[in-house]
Image (spheres, rainbow, N blue to C red):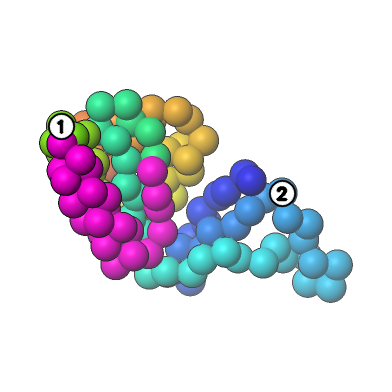
Amino acid sequence: MQMQYQLKAGSYYLYDMQDAPSAVTGERRFKLKTDLVAIAFDLFTGEVRQHGNPTRIQSWANHQRRRLRAAGAVAEANDLVVVSGPLPVDELNKCLWVSGYCRRMFKRLGSLPHGKLI
């Protein structure tokens, strides 16, 4: 899968770029449509764990943290970070495509522009 977010009409659309476009419309089917987007990643490695709708991702992260802490992996649980909101599409896509990029984006989060204005 080659996942990619696109911003259309104020919403984030997630596409698998390996899917063939429709012969009729020329558009690919989207996998997800959401007004805000969230990305969960490991702060130590920068590896993406999950991405998508903020409610689902936050719920997933809370569950994973509970499981890790119950298993005695407190440091790993504390390294699981969720960032959500109107993030720039190019930053989201770099997180999906470049290994460890989330860690770099997280350090610059305060200086990133509002995602829906770009």
Viewer-side residue, 27 vs 102:
102
Q: Main secondary structure of the magenta part?
A: helix
**Which residue reaches farthest right?**
23
Say which residue label 1 marks. Answer: 75
Up-down relation of residue 68 to residue 98 (above or below): below
Disc nearer the start of the sequence (2/1): 2
Q: Is residue 76 visible?
A: yes
Residue type at the position of mark 1? Ala
Q: Is residue 92 left or right of residue 62?
A: right
Tell me the number on the disc at residue 18: 2
Q: Is residue 116 visible?
A: no
Viewer-side residue, 78 vs 21:
78
Mark 2 residue crowding within 10 angstroms, few (<14) / some (14–19) / many (20+): few
Viewer-side residue, 76 vs 109:
76
Q: Residue at x 40, y 49 (%)?
A: 50
Q: Position of residue 115 (x, y in %)?
A: 34, 54
Mark 1 residue crowding within 10 angstroms, few (<14) / some (14–19) / many (20+): few
Up-down relation of residue 51 to residue 79 (above or below): below
